[in-house]
Protein backbone atom coordinates (compact mmCIF):
# COMPACT_ATOMS: atom_id res chain seq x y z
CA UNK A 1 0.00 0.00 0.00
CA UNK A 2 1.44 3.39 -0.93
CA UNK A 3 0.55 7.04 -1.52
CA UNK A 4 2.03 9.83 -3.62
CA UNK A 5 1.59 13.46 -2.47
CA UNK A 6 2.65 16.78 -3.99
CA UNK A 7 3.13 19.89 -1.83
CA UNK A 8 3.73 23.27 -3.38
CA UNK A 9 6.25 26.03 -2.93
CA UNK A 10 5.30 29.09 -0.89
CA UNK A 11 6.18 32.76 -0.55
CA UNK A 12 6.72 33.54 3.13
CA UNK A 13 6.77 36.97 4.82
CA UNK A 14 5.06 38.68 1.85
CA UNK A 15 7.17 41.82 2.45
CA UNK A 16 5.87 43.24 5.75
CA UNK A 17 4.78 40.01 7.52
CA UNK A 18 8.05 38.47 8.72
CA UNK A 19 7.27 34.98 10.09
CA UNK A 20 3.49 35.60 10.08
CA UNK A 21 2.32 35.75 6.43
CA UNK A 22 2.67 33.36 3.50
CA UNK A 23 0.91 32.12 0.40
CA UNK A 24 1.08 29.00 -1.75
CA UNK A 25 1.82 28.94 -5.49
CA UNK A 26 0.90 26.24 -8.02
CA UNK A 27 4.46 25.27 -8.92
CA UNK A 28 7.20 24.29 -8.25
CA UNK A 29 6.81 21.79 -5.41
CA UNK A 30 8.02 18.50 -3.93
CA UNK A 31 6.67 15.00 -4.32
CA UNK A 32 6.73 12.35 -1.62
CA UNK A 33 5.85 8.66 -1.91
CA UNK A 34 5.18 6.69 1.27
CA UNK A 35 4.94 2.90 1.31
CA UNK A 36 3.85 0.71 4.18
CA UNK A 37 6.43 -1.95 5.02
CA UNK A 38 6.30 -5.02 7.23
CA UNK A 39 9.20 -4.12 9.49
CA UNK A 40 8.88 -1.22 11.98
CA UNK A 41 10.78 2.04 11.57
CA UNK A 42 10.88 4.89 9.10
CA UNK A 43 13.41 4.61 6.28
CA UNK A 44 14.20 6.84 3.33
CA UNK A 45 15.16 4.64 0.39
CA UNK A 46 15.53 7.29 -2.30
CA UNK A 47 15.88 11.03 -2.74
CA UNK A 48 16.12 12.57 -6.20
CA UNK A 49 16.80 16.16 -7.24
CA UNK A 50 18.92 17.08 -4.21
CA UNK A 51 22.34 16.47 -5.75
CA UNK A 52 23.07 14.03 -2.91
CA UNK A 53 22.89 16.75 -0.26
CA UNK A 54 20.01 15.59 1.91
CA UNK A 55 20.35 13.02 4.66
CA UNK A 56 18.79 9.60 4.18
CA UNK A 57 18.52 9.36 7.96
CA UNK A 58 14.84 9.93 8.69
CA UNK A 59 15.62 11.84 11.90
CA UNK A 60 17.72 14.37 10.02
CA UNK A 61 15.40 14.91 7.11
CA UNK A 62 12.42 17.26 7.09
CA UNK A 63 10.02 14.70 5.58
CA UNK A 64 11.32 11.92 7.85
CA UNK A 65 10.84 14.05 10.96
CA UNK A 66 7.26 14.95 10.00
CA UNK A 67 6.39 11.25 9.50
CA UNK A 68 8.14 10.15 12.71
CA UNK A 69 6.42 12.84 14.77
CA UNK A 70 3.05 11.81 13.37
CA UNK A 71 3.56 8.10 14.14
CA UNK A 72 4.74 8.98 17.61
CA UNK A 73 1.69 11.15 18.27
CA UNK A 74 -0.84 8.51 17.21
CA UNK A 75 1.16 5.73 18.90
CA UNK A 76 1.67 3.66 15.74
CA UNK A 77 4.64 1.40 15.01
CA UNK A 78 3.72 1.02 11.35
CA UNK A 79 6.88 0.71 9.23
CA UNK A 80 7.16 3.29 6.47
CA UNK A 81 9.52 3.72 3.55
CA UNK A 82 9.87 7.18 1.99
CA UNK A 83 10.86 8.33 -1.48
CA UNK A 84 11.37 12.07 -1.90
CA UNK A 85 11.52 13.80 -5.29
CA UNK A 86 12.86 17.34 -4.73
CA UNK A 87 11.50 19.38 -7.57
CA UNK A 88 12.59 22.78 -6.44
CA UNK A 89 15.89 24.41 -5.57
CA UNK A 90 17.48 24.55 -2.11
CA UNK A 91 18.10 27.82 -0.31
CA UNK A 92 15.81 29.54 -2.82
CA UNK A 93 13.33 31.25 -0.50
CA UNK A 94 10.49 29.17 -1.91
CA UNK A 95 9.91 26.96 1.12
CA UNK A 96 11.60 23.84 -0.19
CA UNK A 97 12.08 22.15 3.19
CA UNK A 98 8.53 23.11 4.22
CA UNK A 99 7.00 21.52 1.10
CA UNK A 100 8.72 18.19 1.83
CA UNK A 101 7.58 18.25 5.46
CA UNK A 102 3.99 19.09 4.49
CA UNK A 103 3.90 16.36 1.85
CA UNK A 104 5.18 13.87 4.46
CA UNK A 105 2.66 14.86 7.14
CA UNK A 106 -0.25 14.84 4.71
CA UNK A 107 0.79 11.54 3.12
CA UNK A 108 1.19 9.60 6.37
CA UNK A 109 -2.21 10.75 7.62
CA UNK A 110 -3.93 9.68 4.39
CA UNK A 111 -2.03 6.39 4.23
CA UNK A 112 -3.11 5.47 7.77
CA UNK A 113 -6.77 6.31 7.31
CA UNK A 114 -6.88 10.11 7.73
CA UNK A 115 -7.70 10.24 11.44
CA UNK A 116 -6.36 13.79 11.91
CA UNK A 117 -7.72 16.97 10.33
CA UNK A 118 -5.52 19.10 8.06
CA UNK A 119 -5.20 21.68 10.89
CA UNK A 120 -3.95 18.97 13.25
CA UNK A 121 -1.15 18.08 10.83
CA UNK A 122 0.50 21.50 11.08
CA UNK A 123 2.66 20.81 14.18
CA UNK A 124 4.30 17.79 12.49
CA UNK A 125 5.22 19.85 9.45
CA UNK A 126 6.56 22.63 11.69
CA UNK A 127 8.86 20.13 13.42
CA UNK A 128 10.17 19.09 10.00
CA UNK A 129 10.89 22.75 9.23
CA UNK A 130 12.76 23.11 12.54
CA UNK A 131 15.19 20.35 11.52
CA UNK A 132 15.92 22.07 8.21
CA UNK A 133 16.21 25.70 9.34
CA UNK A 134 16.83 25.56 13.09
CA UNK A 135 13.67 27.60 13.61
CA UNK A 136 10.06 26.46 13.91
CA UNK A 137 8.43 29.19 11.84
CA UNK A 138 5.15 28.27 10.12
CA UNK A 139 4.84 30.85 7.34
CA UNK A 140 5.93 28.33 4.69
CA UNK A 141 4.41 25.13 6.08
CA UNK A 142 0.96 26.59 6.83
CA UNK A 143 0.25 27.91 3.30
CA UNK A 144 1.77 24.78 1.73
CA UNK A 145 -0.58 22.64 3.85
CA UNK A 146 -3.76 24.71 3.52
CA UNK A 147 -3.23 26.43 0.15
CA UNK A 148 -4.01 30.10 -0.45
CA UNK A 149 -2.96 33.00 1.75
CA UNK A 150 -2.39 32.37 5.45
CA UNK A 151 -1.76 34.48 8.57
CA UNK A 152 -0.04 32.95 11.61
CA UNK A 153 -1.69 35.21 14.19
CA UNK A 154 0.07 33.47 17.08
CA UNK A 155 2.63 30.71 17.59
CA UNK A 156 1.82 29.92 21.20
CA UNK A 157 -0.85 28.78 21.02
CA UNK A 158 -0.79 28.17 17.29
CA UNK A 159 -3.52 30.26 15.65
CA UNK A 160 -3.65 30.15 11.88
CA UNK A 161 -6.11 32.25 9.87
CA UNK A 162 -6.86 31.79 6.17
CA UNK A 163 -7.20 35.06 4.30
CA UNK A 164 -9.37 35.48 1.20
CA UNK A 165 -7.64 36.92 -1.84
CA UNK A 166 -9.04 38.89 -4.79
CA UNK A 167 -9.82 36.91 -7.96
CA UNK A 168 -7.29 38.59 -10.23
CA UNK A 169 -4.32 38.38 -7.87
CA UNK A 170 -1.27 36.78 -9.50
CA UNK A 171 2.31 36.39 -8.49
CA UNK A 172 5.50 36.45 -10.56
CA UNK A 173 8.53 34.95 -8.84
CA UNK A 174 12.08 35.02 -10.04
CA UNK A 175 14.64 32.62 -8.63
CA UNK A 176 18.22 33.69 -9.34
CA UNK A 177 20.57 30.72 -9.13
CA UNK A 178 22.41 31.72 -6.00
CA UNK A 179 21.86 30.10 -2.61
CA UNK A 180 20.92 31.92 0.58
CA UNK A 181 20.65 29.49 3.52
CA UNK A 182 17.71 30.46 5.77
CA UNK A 183 19.78 30.00 8.94
CA UNK A 184 22.27 32.62 7.77
CA UNK A 185 19.59 34.97 6.51
CA UNK A 186 18.00 34.83 9.99
CA UNK A 187 21.27 35.28 11.86
CA UNK A 188 22.04 38.61 10.21
CA UNK A 189 18.76 40.22 11.30
CA UNK A 190 18.73 42.89 14.00
CA UNK A 191 17.39 41.77 17.36
CA UNK A 192 15.94 45.18 18.21
CA UNK A 193 13.92 47.49 16.01
CA UNK A 194 12.96 51.15 16.28
CA UNK A 195 9.41 52.02 17.38
CA UNK A 196 9.07 54.18 14.25
CA UNK A 197 9.83 51.19 12.01
CA UNK A 198 7.50 48.92 13.99
CA UNK A 199 4.64 51.39 13.48
CA UNK A 200 5.26 51.53 9.72
CA UNK A 201 5.48 47.74 9.56
CA UNK A 202 2.29 46.93 11.45
CA UNK A 203 0.44 49.58 9.46
CA UNK A 204 1.52 47.75 6.32
CA UNK A 205 0.55 44.32 7.66
CA UNK A 206 -2.91 45.57 8.54
CA UNK A 207 -3.18 47.40 5.19
CA UNK A 208 -2.19 44.28 3.26
CA UNK A 209 -4.78 42.11 5.02
CA UNK A 210 -7.48 44.76 4.54
CA UNK A 211 -6.52 45.14 0.86
CA UNK A 212 -6.71 41.38 0.28
CA UNK A 213 -10.05 41.03 1.99
CA UNK A 214 -11.59 44.07 0.27
CA UNK A 215 -10.07 43.31 -3.16
CA UNK A 216 -8.42 46.73 -3.03
CA UNK A 217 -5.44 46.21 -5.35
CA UNK A 218 -4.04 49.70 -4.79
CA UNK A 219 -4.05 49.20 -1.01
CA UNK A 220 -2.31 45.83 -1.46
CA UNK A 221 0.36 47.61 -3.50
CA UNK A 222 0.87 50.43 -0.98
CA UNK A 223 1.19 47.92 1.85
CA UNK A 224 3.85 45.72 0.23
CA UNK A 225 6.70 47.46 2.02
CA UNK A 226 9.16 45.99 4.50
CA UNK A 227 11.23 48.51 6.47
CA UNK A 228 12.70 45.97 8.90
CA UNK A 229 13.95 42.80 7.18
CA UNK A 230 14.37 43.74 3.51
CA UNK A 231 16.97 46.50 4.09
CA UNK A 232 19.23 43.92 5.80
CA UNK A 233 18.63 40.89 3.59
CA UNK A 234 18.51 42.60 0.20
CA UNK A 235 22.28 43.10 0.32
CA UNK A 236 22.61 39.31 -0.13
CA UNK A 237 20.75 39.52 -3.47
CA UNK A 238 22.66 41.09 -6.37
CA UNK A 239 20.46 43.37 -8.48
CA UNK A 240 17.63 43.44 -5.94
CA UNK A 241 16.84 47.16 -6.30
CA UNK A 242 16.95 46.98 -10.10
CA UNK A 243 14.62 43.98 -10.12
CA UNK A 244 12.23 45.80 -7.82
CA UNK A 245 12.24 48.92 -10.00
CA UNK A 246 11.73 46.93 -13.21
CA UNK A 247 8.89 45.05 -11.58
CA UNK A 248 7.06 48.22 -10.47
CA UNK A 249 7.67 49.93 -13.82
CA UNK A 250 6.11 46.94 -15.59
CA UNK A 251 2.94 47.28 -13.54
CA UNK A 252 3.41 45.09 -10.46
CA UNK A 253 1.44 46.15 -7.38
CA UNK A 254 4.48 45.56 -5.21
CA UNK A 255 7.58 43.45 -4.83
CA UNK A 256 9.67 41.88 -2.08
CA UNK A 257 12.01 39.07 -1.05
CA UNK A 258 10.36 35.64 -1.07
CA UNK A 259 11.00 34.05 2.33
CA UNK A 260 14.66 34.45 3.20
CA UNK A 261 15.62 34.92 -0.49
CA UNK A 262 17.16 35.06 -3.00
CA UNK A 263 13.86 34.61 -4.89
CA UNK A 264 11.93 37.84 -5.42
CA UNK A 265 8.14 37.87 -5.70
CA UNK A 266 5.87 40.49 -7.25
CA UNK A 267 2.12 40.65 -6.77
CA UNK A 268 0.21 41.70 -9.89
CA UNK A 269 -3.34 42.32 -11.00
CA UNK A 270 -4.02 39.89 -13.84
CA UNK A 271 -2.06 37.07 -15.44
CA UNK A 272 -0.81 39.08 -18.41
CA UNK A 273 0.84 41.66 -16.12
CA UNK A 274 2.42 38.86 -14.07
CA UNK A 275 3.91 37.32 -17.23
CA UNK A 276 5.35 40.69 -18.34
CA UNK A 277 6.73 41.39 -14.86
CA UNK A 278 8.38 37.95 -14.83
CA UNK A 279 10.09 38.73 -18.15
CA UNK A 280 11.27 42.16 -16.96
CA UNK A 281 12.84 40.63 -13.86
CA UNK A 282 14.46 37.88 -15.90
CA UNK A 283 16.15 40.47 -18.14
CA UNK A 284 17.84 42.08 -15.15
CA UNK A 285 19.43 38.82 -13.99
CA UNK A 286 20.42 37.97 -17.56
CA UNK A 287 22.21 41.33 -17.77
CA UNK A 288 24.01 40.46 -14.53
CA UNK A 289 25.00 37.05 -15.94
CA UNK A 290 23.04 35.17 -13.27
CA UNK A 291 20.90 32.21 -14.38
CA UNK A 292 17.30 32.29 -13.20
CA UNK A 293 13.85 30.69 -13.43
CA UNK A 294 10.50 32.46 -13.46
CA UNK A 295 7.28 31.10 -11.99
CA UNK A 296 3.90 32.74 -12.35
CA UNK A 297 0.85 31.62 -10.46
CA UNK A 298 -2.62 32.70 -9.44
CA UNK A 299 -2.93 33.07 -5.68
N1 LIG B 1 9.94 33.66 7.71
C1 LIG B 1 11.09 32.91 7.33
C2 LIG B 1 12.28 33.86 7.20
C3 LIG B 1 10.83 32.23 6.03
O1 LIG B 1 12.11 34.88 6.54
O2 LIG B 1 13.34 33.56 7.74
C4 LIG B 1 12.01 31.49 5.47
O3 LIG B 1 11.94 30.15 5.75
Image (cartoon, helix red, strand yellow):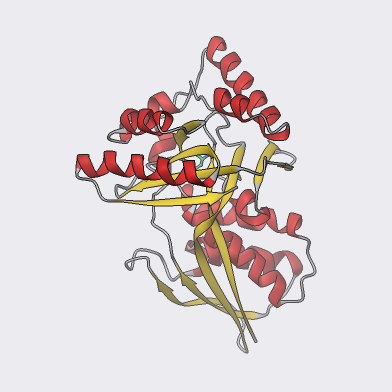
- Is residue 71 shown above or below 3? above
Residue 228, position as x, y percentages in the image: 48, 22
- Given residues 80 and 226, the one toward you in this image is 226
- Quarter residue 23 falls in: top right
Question: Can see residue 251?
Answer: yes
Residue 280, position as x, y percentages in the image: 34, 40
- Quarter residue 190 falls in: top left
**Image-based side of 9 in relation to 279, left or right:** right
**Image-based side of 175 in relation to 119, left or right:** left
Question: Can see residue 233?
Answer: no
Seen at 77% across and 76% down, the residue is 113
- Is residue 186 shown above or below 138? above
Residue 221, position as x, y percentages in the image: 55, 27
Extreme residue in the front direction:
272
**Image-based side of 239 in relation to 232, left or right:** left
**Image-based side of 125 in relation to 293, left or right:** right
Residue 68, position as x, y percentages in the image: 61, 67
Seen at 40% across and 44% down, the residue is 278
- Given residues 170 and 185, the one toward you in this image is 170
Seen at 36% across and 32% down, the residue is 246
Amino acid sequence: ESIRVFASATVANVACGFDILGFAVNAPGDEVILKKKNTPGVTISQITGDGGRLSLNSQENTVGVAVLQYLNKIGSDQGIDITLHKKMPFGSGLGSSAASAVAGAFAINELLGGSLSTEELLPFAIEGERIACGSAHADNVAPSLFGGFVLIRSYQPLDVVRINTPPELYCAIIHPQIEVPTKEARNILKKNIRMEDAITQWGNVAGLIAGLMQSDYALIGRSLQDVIVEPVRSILIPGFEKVKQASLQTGALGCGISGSGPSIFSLCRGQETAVQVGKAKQQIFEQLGIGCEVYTSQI
